[in-house]
Image: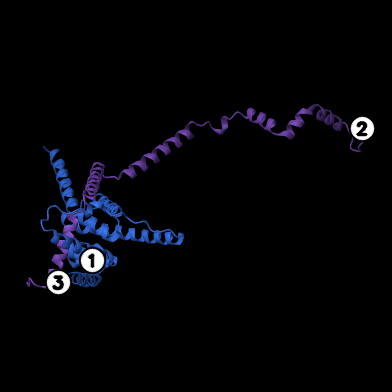
């Protein structure tokens, strides 16, 4: 019985970790994809962030996991930006075009669950336009907006995840909201 | 709490659209995400199974110990300079040195010359 307690505890913590990663993996992937514009690059970034998180931070209290994970992911995305910037410069210097990520054909399949086709088309258009607009935002605005508006982090948590001041978060967030609101209103008018 | 606050409505709408996008990633992406998660959890298991020391330090320590043991064995078992067979070394020196080998080949001549010079007087004339 004495040896069973730590094993149970390990299983519980593994299960808790599994639930946490399952909860955030889709949003984390989307964030990475907004930043990179590439499905495979986004998957690689999520993988790196998850591995780093479980190796170095999974022993931290559960309530810190969310912010820590997004801090790691943001750091990976920034590294990716730096690497891509250098690669693009070299490719441009060599005169080669940047390779494009082919779109997943499954993304364009109709949603069988939604009974209203016109509503679905409108939703699809809106979502496409919103995602395109988020992708076009400067990286810091994009991260501030997604962490605050989608992930529901407060100012302090967002500043920690982004490794910047709360004032910077406010500025980036309000600029992103202004841009995206204008876009959605234009789409509906 | 104003339910018609435009900013709040806008954020709710954005959340809804983004959630919808995250729920419809496509089966290929969903499968890959699951693989990524399982891989990360395996890494967590490896972390737990390793002892308090990181594995790379254990490996580095083992390598250093093995190197030290080999070095100690080498110094302990190698013969000391005092017991070296000097005769063999002299022969080797003779064989490898071309000039000295010539001297040894004409040894009889040099012996004769030496005996003759011993008999020469200080004024340069012979005995």
- The image shows residue B96, relative to residue A174, as above or below, that is above
- Of residues A36 and A21, the one nearer the viewer is A36
Marks 2, 1: nearer the viewer? 1
Kindly indicate whether the residues beneath marks 1 and 3 are on one polypeptide chain: no
User: Which residue ends up furthest to the front in the rendered image?
Assistant: A118
- Respond whether the residues carrying marks 3 and 2 are from the same subunit: yes
Number of dots carrying numbers:
3
What residue is disc 1 on? A144
Which quadrant of the figure contains the N terminus of chain A? Answer: top left
Q: Is residue A159 visible?
A: no
Chain name for mark 2: B
Residue A39: x percent and y percent? 28, 54
Colour of chain A, in one word, is blue
Q: Residues within 10 Å of mark 3 (few under 14, many from 20)?
A: few
Residue found at x 86% / y 30%: B116
Q: Residues within 10 Å of mark 1 (few under 14, many from 20)?
A: many
> What residue sits right under mark 2 in the picture?
B126
Judging by the rendered image, the residue that carries numbered circle 3 is: B7
Place of residue B79 in the rendered image (x, y in percent of width and height, measured from the top left): 53, 31
The front one of A88 and B39 is A88
């Amino acid at each position: 019985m004495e040896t069973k307690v730590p094993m149970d505890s390990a299983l519980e913590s593994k299960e808790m970790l599994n639930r946490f990663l399952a909860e955030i993996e889709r949003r984390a992937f989307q964030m990475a994809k907004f930043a990179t514009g590439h499905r495979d690059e986004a998957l690689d970034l999520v993988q790196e962030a998850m591995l780093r998180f479980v190796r170095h931070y999974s022993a931290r209290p559960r309530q810190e996991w969310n912010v820590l994970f997004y801090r790691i992911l943001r750091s990976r995305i920034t590294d990716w930006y730096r690497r891509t910037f250098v690669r693009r410069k070299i490719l441009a210097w060599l005169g080669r075009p940047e390779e494009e990520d082919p779109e997943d054909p499954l993304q364009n399949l109709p949603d069988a669950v939604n009974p209203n086709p016109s509503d679905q088309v409108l939703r699809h258009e809106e979502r496409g336009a919103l995602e395109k607009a988020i992708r076009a935002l400067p990286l810091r605005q994009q991260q501030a907006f997604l962490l605050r508006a989608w992930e529901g982090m407060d100012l302090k948590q967002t500043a920690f995840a982004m490794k910047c001041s709360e004032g910077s978060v406010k500025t980036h967030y309000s600029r992103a909201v202004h841009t995206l609101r204008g876009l959605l209103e234009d789409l509906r008018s | 709490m104003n339910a018609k606050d435009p900013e709040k409505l806008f954020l709710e709408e954005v959340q809804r659209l983004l959630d919808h996008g995250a729920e419809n990633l496509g089966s290929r992406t969903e499968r890959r995400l699951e693989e990524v998660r399982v891989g990360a959890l395996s890494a967590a298991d490896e972390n737990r199974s390793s002892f308090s020391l990181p594995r790379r330090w254990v490996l580095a320590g083992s390598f250093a110990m093995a190197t030290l043991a080999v070095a100690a064995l080498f110094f302990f078992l190698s013969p000391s300079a005092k017991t070296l067979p000097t005769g063999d070394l002299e022969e080797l020196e003779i064989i490898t040195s071309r000039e000295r080998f010539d001297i040894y080949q004409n040894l009889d001549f040099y012996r004769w010359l030496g005996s003759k010079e011993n008999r020469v007087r200080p004024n340069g004339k012979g005995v």
